[in-house]
Image (cartoon, rainbow, N blue to C red):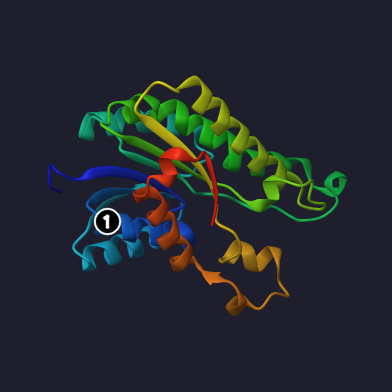
Amino acid sequence: MSKKNKIALVTGAGSGIGKHISILLSKINYHVLLIGRNLNNLEKVDNEIKKVNGSSSIVNLDLNDFQGIDKLGLEIFKKYKKLDLLVLNAGVLGTLGPLTHQDPSEFEDVLKINLIANFRLLRSLDYLLKKSDEGNILCISSGAAHGYRAYWGAYSISKAGLEQMAMIWKAENEHNNVNICVINPGATRTKMRAKAMPGEDPNSIKSAKTTAQKIIKVLKSQKQKDTFKINL
């Protein structure tokens, strides 16, 4: 890894949007820390990054492991001293249906991954982002965070909470060099989307690679610095 590389951390990097964001970041001089719980998937992404002469490191971490998240900041500090980009991409859908029919343990699991784990990541990595010359945080949200969408239960609540948390963090950090931006990727061809919309023609919506390309374009633009929330 060149000393000139910026350091990025991407959660849910083993598949879908996170996979393609990671590969694209590696092409624009980021060393990418690939976070995920499926080691086989992470190794495939790592190999794809090597094929394009990029650099990455695998961090096989389940985001339910809150103690592991707490330790992550220290380990990154020891090796890199900073973090230039945090992409909060990982998420789970849960079962769609009436709110009061959702299993309580599943409701809690969705909030743990989609909201609480992201709080723990912000808490663990805040100092490292502020050590960057120009740190960035991208929160991948969803249209389900708005509009009181029936039957989307824990997922909708968790994404609404994620956006509110990002807004609070931004308000508390107006005068530092770190920017936070919430991105709603819109309908994208992923396994989660297929689960949520089983009757939908997948070819009628954009691919995960196309969505990732749009996210990278946002990252590189002034718009990302001027706008808190962006719909792709």
For residue 157, above or below residue 36: above
Residue at figure coordinates x 33%, y 35% from the top left: 135
- Front in this rendered view, residue 133 or 76: 133
**Element carrying mark 1:** helix
Position of 142 with respect to 74 (left or right) is right
Residue 161, quarter of the rendered image: top right
For residue 64, above or below residue 94: above
Which quadrant of the figure contains the C terminus? Answer: bottom right
For residue 208, above or below residue 136: below
Residue at figure coordinates x 31%, y 54% from the top left: 25
Residue carrying label 1: 26
Residue 50's spot in the image, x, y percent? 22, 63
Residue 27's spot in the image, x, y percent? 25, 59
Residue at figure coordinates x 26%, y 52% from the top left: 56
- Front in this rendered view, residue 83 or 205: 205
Position of 51 with respect to 35 (left or right) is left
Position of 87 with respect to 157 (left or right) is left
Residue 200's spot in the image, x, y percent? 69, 74
Q: How many marks?
A: 1
Residue at figure coordinates x 50%, y 32% from the top left: 66
Residue 195's spot in the image, x, y percent? 67, 65
Can residue 34 be seen here? The reply is: no
Label 1 CA crowd tier, 10 Å (few <14, some 14–19, many 20+) = many
For residue 111, above or below residue 81: below
Can residue 199 be seen here? The reply is: yes
- Tell me the amino acid under the disc marked 1: Ser
